[in-house]
Image (cartoon, grey):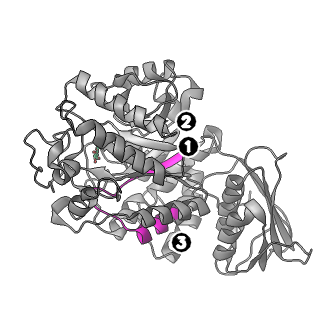
C-alpha cells in the first residue's frame, strides 16, 4: 500500500496516479474564481492570469454551477484542473493542492481528489478581549485556518478586561477600555478600517467573520467606559484579573437599552457576514427575568439589522425565536442551561453549534506541564481533540447541528507565539472532526498525515507543540 496523500483534514476520496510529477508554473482563474486563484498563486510563487491559452503547466480553476457540493481536483503530469460549484469549494481545493506540493521540489504527483465538507460551520472563536491580538497575527491565523478548511472566525471582541472594536456611536468604549488587558498587559483595539481589513482578508481565504459583543454579563469594559451604565452613575474601575461572571448590565437604567441598540446597530453596519453573536454566557449575578429581557432586546436589535443571532447556550433560557444559533460549550450536567435545555431549544427551531469545552477549548493545557493555558475543563491532548463524535453530544436531530467551533480564550495567551503554540497541532485535529465524515477518520492515519502538514507551520515561522503522541 502506498502512503495516504498528506491531506488534513482527510478528504472523501484521494487517489495517487502513476506518472511524472507536475510542476505548476502559473494559475488561471477569472471572475469569482479569482480570490482562490490568487491565494494559490501566492502559495506556489507563480503568476495568476485569467486566460487559459492551453499552454502546459497551468493550474486551471473553474466554477461550474452544475458541479456537486465540494470540489474536484485532478493533477495530470502537465496540468491540474480544479472545479467547484462555488468560490468556497475552490478555496478548499486550493488548500488541498498546496498541501500536496512537495516543498523541496515545488512539484505534485498526479492524483485525483473528490471532496466535500461534513459540517457547514467549521469555526474558531478567538478571544481578543483578555489579550489583544493585532491584525497581523489574525492574518497569520487566517492563513492557518484556510489551510485546514475552517470557514468561520468568531471574534470575541468585548469582555470585562477590554473592548476591542471601535464603535462610532460610543467612542469611549475603545478610548477608555481599548487600552486595558489581563495582568496589566498592553491592550489595543481594531479601528473600523482594521475590522474591514480583517473581514476582507478573511473573505479572500473563504472565511467569514462573526463578531461577538458579549452581553449582558462580561461587560466590565463597557461599565468602565460609561458611568451611565452603572447604578452609581460613576464608571466602574478597570478589571485586569481573570474571574468571570461578576459584571452585568441593568435593565432598569435608562442608558442600558439605547446602549445595546446603538452598539449592535454599529457592529451590524460594519459587518459583511450574516451573523452577530450576542454572548449571553455566565451572567451569574443576574435574576433570570432580567437576563431574558436584555438578551431578547439584544436579539431584536440583531434581527432588526438583518443579521442572524448567535448566543452561548445560556440564551436557550431566554426563549428566542426560531433560527437563533445556540452555541453549546458547557457540557457539565449542572450547567446553567444544560444539554436538555439546549436540545429543547432546537425543538423550538434553534440551530446548534457545538463547542464542547473538554474537546474544543484549545486554551486548556495539553497536560499538567504545559506552560500555557487553563485547566477548568481538563487537559486536551491532540488525541482528545481528535477522537470525539459531534453528533453524540446532544440528543438532537442531526439537521439542527450547524457545525462545530473550537475556542481559544486568551487569559494566558499574551503573544502570537503563545497563540499558535496552543492552537497547533490541536486545531488540525479539530479541523478533521469538522470536515471529515466519521468513516474517513482514524487516529493513526491522521497522525501520519499530520507529520507531513506540520512542516508548513514551521516554514511559516509559527511555533507549535510537539506532542509526544505523534512520531514527528
Ligand atoms: C468560559 S466559554 C468562558 C470564558 C472563559 C473561558 C476560559 C464561555 C462562554 N465563557 O469567559 O474565558 O471559560 O476557558
Task: Judge whether residue 134 is colored magenta.
Answer: yes
Residue annotated with mark 1: 121
Residue at x 41%, y 60% (from the top left corner): 467
Task: Judge whether residue 35 is colored magenta.
Answer: no
Image marks 2 and 1: residues in contact by CB distance under 8 Å: yes
State the image coordinates of residue 165 (x, y, percent, origin top left): 35, 58
* Whether residue 230 is situated above or below residue 374 in the rendered picture: above
Dot 3: within a 10 Å radius of its alpha carbon, few (fewer than 14), some, or many (20 or more) residues? some
Q: Nearer the viewer, residue 122 or 452?
A: 122
Looking at the image, can residue 172 be seen?
Answer: yes
Earlier sequence position, callout 3 versus callout 1: 1
Which region of the structure is painted magenta? 122-142
Label 1 residue SS: strand
Residue at x 32%, y 47% (from the top left corner): 379
Q: CA distance from mark 3 to mark 2?
A: 32 Å
Q: Nearer the viewer, residue 125 or 262?
A: 262
302 relative to 279 in the view: left or right = right
The quarter holding residue 369 reads: bottom left
Q: Which mark is residue 453?
A: none
Q: CA distance from mark 3 to mark 1?
A: 27 Å
Q: Which mark is residue 455?
A: 3
* Whether residue 223 is situated above or below residue 185 in the rendered picture: above
Label 2 residue SS: strand
Looking at the image, can residue 463 be seen?
Answer: no
4 relative to 129 in the view: left or right = right
State the image coordinates of residue 399 (x, y, percent, origin top left): 60, 28
Residue annotated with mark 2: 402
Amino acid at each position: 500500500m502506498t502512503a495516504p496523500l498528506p491531506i488534513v483534514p482527510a478528504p472523501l476520496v484521494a487517489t495517487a496516479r502513476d506518472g511524472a510529477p507536475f510542476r505548476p508554473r502559473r494559475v488561471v482563474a477569472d471572475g469569482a474564481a479569482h480570490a482562490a486563484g490568487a491565494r494559490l498563486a501566492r502559495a506556489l510563487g507563480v503568476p495568476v492570469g485569467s486566460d487559459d491559452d492551453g499552454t502546459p503547466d497551468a493550474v486551471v480553476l473553474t466554477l461550474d454551477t452544475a458541479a456537486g457540493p465540494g470540489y474536484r481536483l485532478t493533477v495530470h503530469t502537465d496540468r491540474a484542473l480544479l472545479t467547484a460549484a462555488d468560490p468556497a469549494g475552490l478555496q478548499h481545493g486550493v488548500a488541498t493542492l498546496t498541501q500536496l506540493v512537495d516543498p523541496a521540489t515545488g512539484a505534485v504527483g498526479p492524483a485525483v481528489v473528490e471532496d466535500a465538507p461534513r459540517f457547514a460551520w467549521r469555526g474558531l472563536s478567538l478571544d481578543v478581549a483578555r489579550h489583544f491580538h493585532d491584525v497581523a497575527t489574525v492574518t497569520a491565523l487566517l492563513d492557518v485556518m484556510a489551510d485546514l478548511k475552517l470557514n468561520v472566525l468568531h471574534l470575541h471582541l468585548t469582555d470585562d478586561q477590554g473592548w476591542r472594536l471601535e464603535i462610532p456611536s460610543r467612542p469611549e468604549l475603545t478610548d477608555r477600555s481599548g487600552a486595558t488587558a489581563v495582568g496589566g498587559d498592553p491592550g489595543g483595539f481594531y479601528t473600523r478600517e482594521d475590522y474591514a481589513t480583517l473581514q476582507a482578508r478573511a473573505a479572500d481565504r473563504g472565511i467569514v467573520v462573526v463578531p461577538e459583543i458579549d452581553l449582558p454579563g462580561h461587560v466590565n469594559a463597557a461599565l468602565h467606559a460609561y458611568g451611565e451604565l452603572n447604578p452609581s452613575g460613576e464608571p466602574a474601575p478597570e478589571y485586569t484579573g481573570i474571574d468571570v461572571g461578576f459584571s452585568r448590565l441593568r435593565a432598569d437604567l435608562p442608558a442600558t437599552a439605547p446602549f445595546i441598540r446603538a452598539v449592535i446597530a454599529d457592529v451590524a453596519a460594519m459587518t459583511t457576514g450574516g451573523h452577530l453573536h450576542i454572548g449571553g454566557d455566565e451572567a451569574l449575578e443576574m435574576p433570570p427575568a432580567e437576563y431574558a429581557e436584555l438578551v431578547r432586546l439584544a436579539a431584536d436589535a440583531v434581527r432588526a439589522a438583518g443579521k442572524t443571532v448567535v448566543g452561548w447556550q445560556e440564551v436557550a433560557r431566554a426563549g428566542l425565536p426560531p433560527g437563533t444559533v445556540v452555541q453549546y460549550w458547557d457540557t457539565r450536567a449542572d450547567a446553567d442551561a444544560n444539554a436538555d435545555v439546549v436540545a429543547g431549544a432546537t425543538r423550538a427551531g434553534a440551530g446548534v453549534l457545538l463547542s464542547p469545552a473538554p474537546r474544543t477549548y484549545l486554551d486548556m493545557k495539553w497536560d499538567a506541564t504545559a506552560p500555557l493555558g487553563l485547566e477548568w475543563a481538563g487537559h486536551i491532548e491532540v488525541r482528545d481533540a481528535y477522537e470525539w463524535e459531534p453528533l453524540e453530544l446532544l440528543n438532537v436531530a442531526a439537521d439542527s447541528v450547524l457545525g462545530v467551533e473550537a475556542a481559544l480564550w486568551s487569559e494566558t495567551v499574551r503573544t502570537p507565539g503563545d497563540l499558535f503554540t496552543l492552537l497547533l497541532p490541536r486545531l488540525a485535529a479539530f479541523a478533521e472532526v469538522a470536515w471529515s465524515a466519521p468513516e474517513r477518520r482514524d487516529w493513526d492515519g491522521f497522525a501520519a498525515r499530520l507529520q507531513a502538514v506540520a512542516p508548513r507551520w514551521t516554514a511559516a515561522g509559527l511555533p507549535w507543540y510537539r506532542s509526544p503522541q505523534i512520531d514527528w
